[in-house]
Image: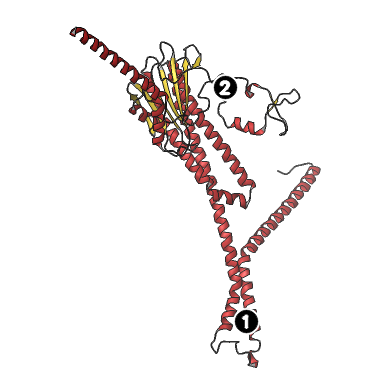
Amino acid sequence: MGLDQEDQSGEAEEMDTETSRESALREIQTNRTRTRFPGAVRQKAYRFDGLGNFYDKEWDLKEGTGKEFCWYHVEIPRGNHKLSLSAQYLIDVLCPPLKLQDILSLVSNGPFCGHVDGALVFRVNSPGPAHSDFTIRIAARVTENSVITVSLGRVPRMGFSPTGQSLLSEIPSVGSPSVVRGQENDGDGIVILEHVLEFFLTMNHSEEADNPVPKTVSNLLVHVLDTHMDHLQDIVTKLEMDLDSVELDMDKGGFASKKQMMDDRRFPKMHINLQRLLQVIAHGEQVFPRVKEKCATKSWFANEDIVSLEELIGRVRRLKENVGFIATRVTAIQAGLDSWQAEQINKKLYYLSFLSIIFLPLSIVTGVFGMNVGGVPWTGQNNPALKDGFRNVILICVAMLLFVLLCFIFPAIYVRLTSWRKQMAVKRSWSLNKRSFLRRNLEGRSQERSGYLRL
């Protein structure tokens, strides 16, 4: 009996431990589904079958089996928040199974490429305020059957979705701005309005074009880096178009538009944005070759994707040169605007000095007649010999004013006179050349009549 009771108590203890384990696992699962920041980040999960097809899947962070592989993408929202809050967002959606070292390797600033806990991790994260469009952050954790990527804000053309009928597949036509977008223009095609064209022109690639479904993890990694480069190219293209519009406004506009540009500090802000963009490109120039070297050692990474990574490295270098040209262009425009501002200040100082010179004789008259001392010339108006003293002082003041005006006007008069003399000299030489030409023609005709030509 005692042995039976002991066996029953042991079985009860085992059942209790199993139930406690099941409850702990249930609690872990509920904690994973119940996040601390619900809806704070955008999450996308895809499953690829390796044959060119993809499917949406649940956010379980499991790896694929066989030819199948999974992709989990996190979009951190742009806003005025600290880097620690971005880390909390990632901990909320990626832990478990990821560890703290994985989170730090994905969210930290600066370039990085290396192996963390057996997975290839790289990031191209630029420091700067998260709300700025020129602060670009992209990071990835790559294994043989799964890829986890993190980006700051939305990256165009990165995700996959079933594409329907698009404007890009339609025949466009030119119409008036009153025509509604998408309306047919008498059977000639779809009318594309101006603001829609401007939107398409700012994009290096459209959402529907050149976006094949990857068949391997290496295809997916090349796709992520390619869309990142397209995003940078779109930003550079938009910046060039903005710069073109600014130059056009400066050429057309007058004092008000240039003054507004100076007050808004438009070009210094452009310089700051360009420096941030150059920093992102420089980080990519450091990271992408190391990613290619490490991926070349992987057996599951295809050789054609290695070639694609080499082409991406060349794109990074060309984009860096292009951004350098834009920075030089902005510097030249800023120098022109600074010279215009200096010219405006010089004009104001010129007018101020001119007014002060005009009132200088009046101040002299005031000083002469306001002095409370005796013996000053032309101040004794009761003396018959000095009855015209005031008139003499006024004449002297007028003479001084005319002399000053002549000093100011003399350079312009001298330039006009010099140009007139040059024009007269040119006309005189032209008339002399014309006379000599006519005389030579007459002599030539007379010589022809006489039967021989003088050499």
- As drawn, 414 above or below 365: above
Give coordinates of residue 358: x percent, y percent: 61, 71
What is the quadrant of residue 453 in the picture?
Answer: top right
Q: Residue at x 59, y 60 (%)?
A: 347
Amino acid at circle 1:
Val
Q: Nearer the viewer, residue 48 or 325?
A: 48
User: Residue 393 — which label?
Assistant: 1
Q: Nearer the viewer, residue 451 or 197?
A: 197
Q: Secondary structure at mark 2?
A: loop
Q: Nearer the viewer, residue 46 or 25?
A: 25
Amino acid at circle 2:
Ala
Label 2 packing within 10 angstroms: few (<14), some (14-19), many (20+): few
Q: Secondary structure at mark 1?
A: helix
Quadrant that contains the N terminus: top left
Name the residue at the left extreme.
Answer: 2
Quadrant that contains the C terminus: top right
Q: Residue at x 62, y 79 (%)?
A: 396
Tell me, what colour scheme is on the image?
A: secondary structure
